[in-house]
Image (spheres, helix red, strand yellow):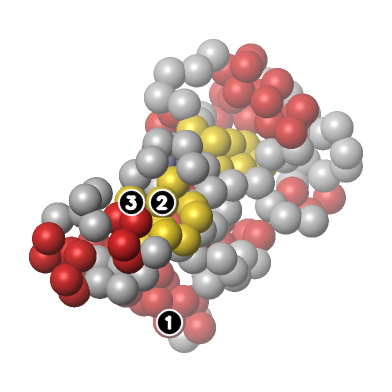
């Protein structure tokens, strides 16, 4: 089964990383704890949080032994989003390149490939000249291309894999 997540309001950057990797990850800036838990349970999402109390309030078992209807959660040990990502990748054995470039980092919706001609007026001229692959978000209409920011993030992911492999 495909893993899906819901991120607590204190781990927004981690949510973006998971979306970059292609994982369906909900994130709300301001959300009531009960609602967060309810969505996680209803949609079978793994709750990602820094909040010890949130995890302790319910009987939470480790993801590997979680049964249907039990809240699955990962209590993140670090403040640094990259270290958080590392913890999640490790605990769930995530594949870093499962489906990159398929999900909007801002709103979590799926991306659809667009022909170059379709985005001519929607991207800066330099980008239009230098890029050949474009994706558009079905939710917020944002256009994505494999520009420098995207490349940087993927280099970070690559580093993460290498560090993991050398352990
Ligand atoms: Zn979007």
Identify the residue position indicated by label 1 in the image.
162
Q: Is residue 87 above or below residue 70?
A: below
- Residues under labels 2 and 1: Cα distance? 30 Å
Q: Are marks 2 and 3 in contact (CB under 8 Å)?
A: yes
Identify the residue position indicated by label 3 in the image.
143
Q: Residue furthest front?
A: 117
Task: Determine crowd level at label 3: few under 14, some 14-19, many 20+ residues with C-alpha closer than 10 A.
Answer: some
**Can you tell which of label 1 and label 3 is closer to the viewer?**
3
Point 61% across, 65% down: residue: 94
**Can you tell which of label 2 and label 1 is closer to the viewer?**
2
The answer as to whether callout 2 falls within 8 Å of ligand 1 is no
Task: Determine crowd level at label 1: few under 14, some 14-19, many 20+ residues with C-alpha closer than 10 A.
Answer: few
The percent coordinates of residue 86 (x first, y second) are 48, 61
Q: Which mark is residue 136?
A: 2
Q: Residue furthest left?
A: 126
Point 50% across, 18% down: residue: 31
The image shows a total of numbered marks equal to: 3
- Helix, strand or loop status at disc 2: strand
Q: Viewer-proximal residue, 52 or 71?
A: 71
The percent coordinates of residue 6 (x first, y second) are 58, 36
**Mark 1 or mark 2, which is nearer the start of the sequence?**
2
Point 69% across, 39% down: residue: 45
């Amino acid at each position: 089964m495909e893993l899906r997540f819901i991120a607590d309001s204190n781990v927004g950057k981690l949510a973006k990383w998971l979306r970059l990797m292609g994982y369906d990850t909900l994130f709300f800036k301001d959300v009531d704890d009960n609602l967060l838990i309810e969505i996680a349970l209803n949609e079978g999402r793994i709750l990602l949080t820094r909040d010890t109390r949130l995890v302790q309030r319910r009987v939470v078992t480790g993801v590997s032994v979680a049964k249907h209807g039990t809240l699955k959660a990962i209590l993140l040990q670090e403040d640094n989003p990259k270290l958080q990502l590392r913890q999640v990748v490790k605990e769930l054995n995530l594949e870093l390149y499962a489906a990159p470039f398929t999900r909007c980092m801002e709103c979590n919706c799926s991306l659809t490939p667009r022909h170059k001609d379709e985005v001519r007026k929607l991207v800066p001229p330099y980008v239009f000249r230098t890029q050949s692959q474009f994706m558009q978000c079905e939710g917020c209409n944002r256009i994505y291309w494999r520009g420098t920011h995207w490349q940087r993030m993927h280099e970070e992911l690559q580093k993460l894999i290498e560090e993991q492999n050398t352990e």
